[in-house]
C-alpha cells in the first residue's frame, strides 16, 4: 500500500476529478481517498494506492508536485510505509 498526500486541493474538487487528474499524469486508479480539511486555506486529500509499489509512486509523484491545477499549486508528498502490525 502506498499513500500520496495531495496538498492545497480545493474542497469543491470531486474525487472523480482527482482521479482524472492523476490518470492524466500516469497514475493507476486509486483504491481510496480521504479528505483532510485545512485550517482554512490548504485542504488536502490522502490518496491510497493498494496495487502499486511506493518506488513507482515516487516516480509518478514528481510529475505533479508543485503543478498548477484547478487554480491552485498542488503539492504531492509520498508518505513513508507504516508498520500496522
Image: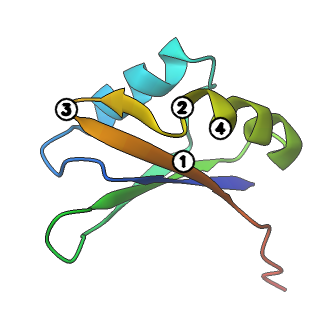
Q: Secondary structure at mark 4?
A: helix
| Disc 3 crowd, CA 10 A, few/some/many (<14, 14-19, 20+) | few
**In the rendered image, which residue does mark 4 sit on?**
61
Residue drawn at the location 69% of the way across and 30% of the way down: 60
**In the image: residue 84, left or right of residue 34:** right
Disc 1 + disc 2, Cβ < 8 Å: yes
Residue drawn at the location 67% of the way across and 34% of the way down: 62
Q: Position of residue 12 (x, y in %)?
A: 12, 44
Residue most toward the bottom? 85
**In the rendered image, which residue does mark 2 sit on?**
64
**In the image: residue 45, left or right of residue 40:** right
Could you say which disc has been placed on residue 71 in the image? Answer: 3
Residue drawn at the location 20% of the way across and 77% of the way down: 39
Disc 2 + disc 4, Cβ < 8 Å: yes
**In the rendered image, which residue does mark 1 sit on?**
76
Judging depth in this view, the residue of 3 and 69 nearest the camera is: 69
**In the image: residue 76, left or right of residue 70:** right
Disc 4 + disc 1, Cβ < 8 Å: yes
| Disc 4 crowd, CA 10 A, few/some/many (<14, 14-19, 20+) | many
| Cα separation between marks 3 and 2 | 14 Å
> Which circle's residue, 3 or 1, is located before the other in the chain?
3
Residue drawn at the location 74% of the way across and 39% of the way down: 57
Amino acid at each position: 500500500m502506498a499513500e500520496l498526500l495531495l496538498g492545497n486541493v480545493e474542497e469543491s474538487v470531486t474525487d472523480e476529478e482527482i482521479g482524472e487528474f492523476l490518470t492524466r499524469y500516469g497514475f493507476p486508479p486509486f483504491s481510496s481517498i480521504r479528505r483532510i480539511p485545512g485550517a482554512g486555506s490548504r485542504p488536502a486529500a490522502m490518496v491510497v494506492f493498494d496495487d502499486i509499489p511506493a518506488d513507482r509512486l515516487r516516480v509518478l509523484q514528481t510529475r505533479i508536485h508543485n503543478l498548477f491545477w484547478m487554480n491552485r499549486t498542488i503539492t504531492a508528498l509520498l508518505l513513508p510505509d507504516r508498520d500496522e502490525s
